[in-house]
Amino acid sequence: MSTLFWRVDNAQFVMLDATTEINFEHSALVTEHPIASALSVTDHVQDLPDRFNVRGLVTGSPTPNLTNPIAGRVESAREFLLGCKSDGALLIVQTQRYGSFDNCVIERITYVVNREQALRVDIAVRRIRLAEVGYVAIPPEAPLAAASSSMPDAQDVGIQATTTSTDTQVDAGSASFLYSAIYGS
């Protein structure tokens, strides 16, 4: 059984020659509120994104590098997986037995290159939920004055004059987008 890690932003991929183990974790967050009688009240359950670990092996066999057949493919796979983790790249993970998982990121990767120059990897993957959001940009200069001047007869009815805008270049997980959405440019 093999597993394919496909990078969404540039269509590059790496395939594990053999997948030795896949472990799935499906969990939820359950709230608990203690009350005076030492009992806990639960009022909410939040389904958390799925996580799974993939353990496998990359060798030099399917696409060898002509100058160093084994090390070339092993090193390329290692660099690809580490790059995906450090970039926070969005991945599609395709398995033969369990199907395809979209919107994945690598949380953790451990690896060892053994005597036979094969790369043994243990990759912790997390599925994320993507949301496209619009936001309202409030003018920085006197927002209340702008609101009241745009109202009929200059009556303040509690609604600010705003400009609606959406950012079409939103990157999943982009801290700069979130910062600009909260604090402005």
Image (spheres, grey):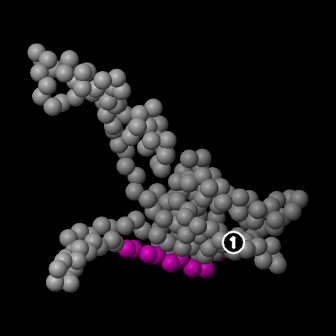
Amino acid type, mark 1: Tyr
**Residue 130 seen in render:** yes
Q: Position of residue 134 (x, y in %)?
A: 34, 38
In the image, which residues are magenta? 18-27
From the viewer's perspective, is 50 left or right of 55? left
Q: Nearer the viewer, residue 13 or 145?
A: 145
**Figure quadrant of the N terminus:** bottom right
Query: Residue furthest toward the front?
Result: 36
Task: List the residue tagged with mark 1.
Answer: 111
Q: How many marks?
A: 1
Q: Position of residue 43 (x, y in %)?
A: 20, 70
Q: Is residue 2 magenta?
A: no
Q: Residue at x 44, y 75 (%)?
A: 25
Q: Is residue 24 magenta?
A: yes
Residue 166, located in which quarter of the rendered image?
top left
Which secondary structure, mark 1?
A: strand
